[in-house]
Image (cartoon, grey):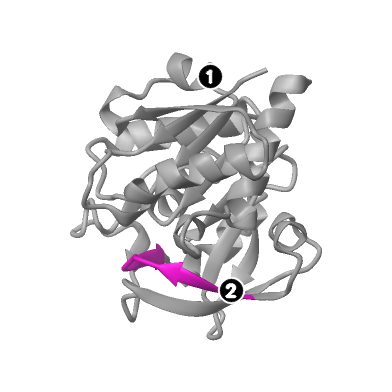
Amino acid sequence: MTTRLALVGDRSPHVRSHVRIPTLLAALHGRDHLDLDAYWLSTDEVDEPTIAGFDGVWLLPGSPYRSEDGAVTAVRTARERDIPFLGTCGGFQHALLEYARDVCGMATAQHGENNPASEDLLIVPLACSLAGHDAAVRVEPDSLAGRVLGTTRTVERYFCAYGLDPGRLDALRAGGMRFTGFDEEGEVRVAELPEHPFFLATLFQPELAGDGTRAHPIVRAFAEAASSRVRQ
C-alpha cells in the first residue's frame, strides 16, 4: 500500500531543504523500496482534518512560516493522533512551541523569530548562528534518536539561528518531552516523545546529509514508521 506523507512547509526554490526533498524521495523509493506519495502543504492551508488523513507528517525548514498557526496545528494533529512526525530546523522549533503551549500550560509562549518583542519567548536567538555550519551532536543511546542513528555522536548540518531557551528545559521535561541530543556545550539539538509511535524533532537538518542519493537514517526511519502505520 502507498504511504501518504504530508510535507508541511512553504515550498521555495531558495530553501535548500526543499530542493533536496525530491532526490530523497527517489532514494527512499529506489534504495529502501518505500512506496511514498508525498504532498506539499503550505502552512496557510493546513487544518486538522487534512493532516489527519496522512500517514506521516514532516514539518520542514523555511521559517518564518506563512502561518505559525498552521505549523503548530500540523504538530498537534500528528502528536494527538499518533501519526509519525518529523520536525527539522523550524519544525523542531515549532514542535517545542506546540508542546509548551498545549501540554505544558505555557499558553503565551512565543517564537522569537515571529514575535521578537514578546516577554515570553520559548524559542530564542542562538548565541552563535548555526547557519551553514556542521557541528557535533551527542546522542543518548537509550533513545529513539540513538537507536535510529546507531551511534552516540554524529556530525550534522545546520541552517538555523534560533533554538530553545535553556531555562524552559525542566518545564518541558516535566510535561513528558525527552531531550536526547545535545551539542558540545550542552545545548539541546534533539527532542522526542517516548509515548508516541514516532515523534522526533532535530534542530539540525538530516535531509541535507551527503548528496541526497542515500537518505539519512533519521529520514529513512521516519518514512519506515509512516509505512508501518499503513500496514497496521
* Figure quadrant of residue 42: top left
Mark 1 nearby-residue class (10 Å; few <14, some 14–19, many ≥20): some
- Tell me residue 5's x, y (percent): 52, 29
Do residues under tags 2 and 1 come within 8 Å of each other at their CB atoms? no
Please name the residue shown 51% across and 71% down the image. Answer: 156
Outermost residue toward the front in this view: 30
**In the displayed structure, would residue 119 be above or below residue 185?**
above
Front-lying residue, 43 or 95? 43
Mark 2 nearby-residue class (10 Å; few <14, some 14–19, many ≥20): some
Q: Can residue 123 be seen in this view?
A: yes
Mark 1: amino acid: Ala
Q: Can residue 105 be seen in this view?
A: no
- Tell me residue 88's x, y (percent): 46, 53
Q: Name the residue under label 2.
A: 182
Circle 1: element type: helix
Magenta range: 154-163
Circle 2: element type: strand
| Label of residue 52 in the image | 1
**Which of marks 1 and 2 precedes in the sequence?**
1
Q: How far apart are marks 2 and 1 (CA)?
A: 31 Å
- Tell me residue 143's x, y (percent): 76, 59
Q: Is residue 182 magenta?
A: no
**In the displayed structure, would residue 42 be above or below residue 231?**
below
Relative horizontal placement of residue 212, taking residue 159 as reference (left or right): right
Please name the residue shown 50% across and 65% down the image. Answer: 210
* Figure quadrant of residue 93: bottom left
Mark 2: amino acid: Phe
Front-lying residue, 25 or 9? 25
- Tell me residue 208's x, y (percent): 44, 60
Q: Main secondary structure of the magenta part?
A: strand
